[in-house]
Image: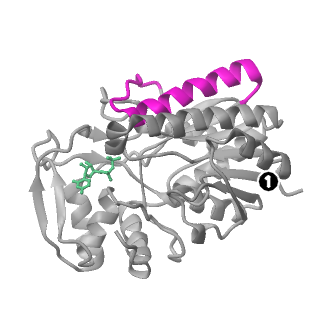
Amino acid sequence: MQKTVLVVGGAGYIGSHTCMMLAKRGYIPVVFDNLYNGHEEFVRWGILERGDIRDRARIAEVIATHKPDAILHFAALIEVGESVKNPLAFYENNVIGSLNLLQSAIDGGVKHIVFSSTCATYGLPETETLDETHGQKPINPYGRTKWIVEQAIRDYSDLLGLSAVILRYFNAAGADFEGRIGEWHKPETHAVPLAIEAAMGRRQGFKIFGTDYPTRDGTCVRDYIHVLDLADAHVRAVDYLLAGGKTEAINLGTGVGTTVRELLDTIRAVSGRDFTVEEAPRREGDSTLLVADNKKAAALLGWAPRYGIEDIVRSAWNWHSKHNAPH
Ligand code: UDP
């Protein structure tokens, strides 16, 4: 029988790509989203149940209606700068909302959860690549809210029989190759979409935040991971939990670092377009280098990334060329 998966935040960027992958692998996705950052037109695989994770009664109602076999929890506020200006919103949505969801899952008999966490929970890296045992000292409220939920998940696992996969993403980017869904944030703050829109002439140019970092070209190094690789890992995480897997935290990155200048070069090469680049001061809170050690994902989920930075740029370009979002 087909299994049902409740995808909380399924109208958002990574959630919608995961719904597509769930449907392709024979699961029935049900989207729960307040459409604050999500987009109704992204709900193409499975139905939409509108609701907010701050409303525990509404979550309980949806769980009772659909009796999901597992829950994927993507819903969160994600913008680091915003978290510094308005921590309350982050604690209410990301912490209280997640606690509501964990408790509703247990009350409703759902024992399996996949939680979207982040490499931002590690804080400042002490090693060239980060594995899951690296210390966790998040440096902003966003990272701290995710870290707190990780701790709550461990308590729920030890005390209440939850089994969960905590996925710590590195830099999600790219889009569905058919260009039906893609990265669409309002306002946009991420390097890949901003640089692509600059190359398309939709923005004035691109500002590099910091050119004096101790890296090969002075700009920050990030591990950009294709959203379809992330989606694939989520489906594998559900398979793992349904097969009896226990609670684990797992990195999702490619293990390959790309500097901001290398990203811009790739966009120029893929698109054949040049654009204005300004060298700006460092952005507060940016780590020099964030690259994943992804061996645990391979060992536990049989997962390996299929796509690289060129595929990311190509698919993102395709999506942006079909979709001109107001900003
Ligand atoms: N970045 C940049 N200009 C921008 C946006 C981002 O130079 O307009 C840099 C940023 O400093 C970081 C990298 O691009 O080194 C990736 O930033 P993004 O915001 O996409 O993700 P983050 O790593 O902050 O999660």
Q: Is residue 18 above or below residue 164?
A: below
Q: Quadrant of the N terminus?
A: bottom right
Q: Is residue 62 above or below residue 274?
A: above
Q: Amino acid at mark 1?
A: Thr
Is the image coloured rainbow, by chain, by secondary structure, or in one colour?
Answer: one colour
- Disc tally is 1
Q: Is residue 325 left or right of residue 20?
A: left
Q: Is residue 242 left or right of residue 8?
A: right
User: Magenta stretch containing residue 143, yes or no?
Assistant: yes
User: Magenta stretch containing residue 165, yes or no?
Assistant: no
In the image, which residues are magenta?
133-162
Q: Which residue occupies 65% across, 60% down?
A: 19
Q: Which residue occupies 35% across, 44% down?
A: 82
- The residue identified by callout 1 is 4
Mark 1 crowdedness (10 Å alpha carbons): few <14, some 14-19, many ≥20: many
Q: Is residue 301 left or right of residue 49?
A: left
The residue nearer to you, when weighing 88 against 109, is 88
Q: Which residue occupies 35% across, 35% down?
A: 129
Circle 1: element type: strand
The residue nearer to you, when weighing 145 against 216, is 145
Q: Which residue occupies 43% across, 71% down?
A: 315
Q: Position of residue 20 (x, y in %)?
A: 64, 65
Name the chief secondary structure element in magenta.
helix
Can you tell which quarter of the image residue 120 is in? top left
Q: Position of residue 78 (x, y in %)?
A: 43, 46
Q: Position of residue 239 (x, y in %)?
A: 73, 46
